Each structure stands twice: as structure tokens, then as C-alpha cells.
Image: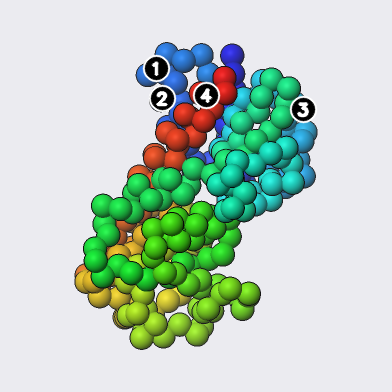
Amino acid sequence: MSRFGLLGKNIAYSFSRGYFKAKFEAEQLPFTYENFDLADIAMFPKLLQDHPDISGLNVTIPYKEQVLPYLDKLDKKAKKIGAVNTITINSKGKLKGYNTDCYGFKKSLQPFLKKHHKKALILGTGGASKAIAYTLKKMKIKFDYVSRTPKVNVKFTYDELTVKDIQNYKIIINCTPVGTHPEVNSCPEIPYDGITDQHLLYDLIYNPEETKFLRLGKSQGAQICNGLKMLEFQAEKAWKIWNSTL
């Protein structure tokens, strides 16, 4: 029996475990899927040692970048992005990293796009934001980052953002964990007064279904989308990758 799972930290809320468990049962596949909740990425080699039957992993916050040094190989797209969310482990124990977030994001974003959606603000600069930036570039949508602290390639810090800035970017994407259950009363600190009915607010968070970030956008007339569809699309893509290596 092959074992699959999710690598992350504080992931009891995880979508993936329920999704794959239901999938394996429905398709009568002899596989298991579980959460591998690590306090530190340094524990990763021991996890693999303790579970030699692991054939594939999903990777979530905060390990999408931190896991890279432990991999033997990266697929071309993952290398360009600089973050992985899917890992295969072959019969020789070799680990290869992929990124299916970009696929999931594109597929879930496309139905919402209108002609005026030409510029995006990416909130956050972690591993998840890298796949989003890669996808926007491919879709020829200009973007800038917002971060808590000044960094290279970051145009705005949160305390610098103005209403006018918000009005200039008709897509705003939350790639931070701010607002995830149970911290449901938190949201990225941006000037929500600048949001209009021309805006699209996209939150990678899916629990809760409607975050405070999305709720505040909706109250200003914006279109909103959470991260559930993206997760479903990326999960199916991850399964295709695992399946091709079994």
C-alpha cells in the first residue's frame, strides 16, 4: 500500500486529507493520505526514514520553499517559481519537486477576469505568492507586491498603501495566512475604501469560506473568490503527477 500526505505546520484544518481520503475511497484505490505536521523542516529526513512507504506529498505553509534543499530534483516550472507544493518519491527514495499551485490558480482565476483586470497587487511574499506571480506573468497581468517590511522587488509596505494605490490595481490577491481559521476576525491591513465594483479580490484561504478580506471587498461591490477551487484543481494535477510515477 502506498502512503501519501500533506507536509506542513499546524495543518489540522487541512483540505487535502479529506479530499484525497474521499477520492481514494470512491475510486477504491489502496492508498492512504494523512497529515505530516512538522514543527520544523529539519524533522523532514526523519519523517521519510520512519515512513519508507510514502510515495508522494503535498506541501503547504510554511515549507514550500524550506523543503527545497531536501529534494534531489525540481521540475522546470518549480525551479522557475522557486517553491514546490507537490513531491514524488521514487522506488530509490529520490525526491522530485513540482508546483501545481500555478495551474490551480490560473484555472480558478480565469472565469472572473474582465478586460479592465490588467494590474494585480499580491499581498505577501512567501512560497504561495511565488506561484501566483509566475502565473500572472504568464497571463500578461502586471503585478506588484505588498509586504510588511521593505524588500527587493517589493513596491509597497502595508503602511504606505493609499486609497489611490488600491484604485489602481483592480485585482488584489491575499497570499498570506492572515484570516485563516481560527483567526477569522483578522485581515490584511489595506485601505478597503479604495475597492470598487471593478475590483476582484482573491483569497488563497478557503477556511473560512468567506474571510474578512473577502467580506470587506464584497461590501464595496467587488467580485470575490476564495482558494477552494484552486486547491481542487492543484490537487487533481498533483494526483496525475503521483499516478504517473506509481
Residue type at mark 4 is Ser
Q: What percent of the width, then of the height, locates residue 46?
A: 77, 33
Q: Quick one: 177 or 100, which is closer to the camera?
A: 100
Q: What percent of the width, then of the height, locates residue 230?
A: 39, 46
Q: Which residue is mark 2?
A: 23
Task: Give the CA separation, mark 4 to mark 2.
Answer: 17 Å
Q: Which residue is mark 1?
A: 27
Position of 189 relative to 69 (above/below): below
Task: Give the CA separation, mark 3 to mark 1.
Answer: 29 Å
Residue 10 can be seen in this image: no
**Which quadrant would residue 224 be assigned to in this image?**
bottom left
Task: Give the CA separation, mark 1 to mark 2.
Answer: 6 Å
Q: Left or right: 234 with respect to 8?
A: left
- How dense is the environment of label 2, judged by Cα within 10 Å: few (below 14), some, or many (20 and up)? some
Sequence order check: which comes first, mark 4 or mark 1? 1
Q: Left or right: 10 with respect to 121?
A: right
Q: Quick one: 196 or 25, which is closer to the camera?
A: 196
Residue type at mark 1 is Glu
Residue type at mark 2 is Lys
Residue visible at 42% across and 76% down?
190
Residue visible at 33% across and 64% down?
201
Q: Which residue is mark 3?
A: 49
Residue visible at 33% across and 69% down?
118
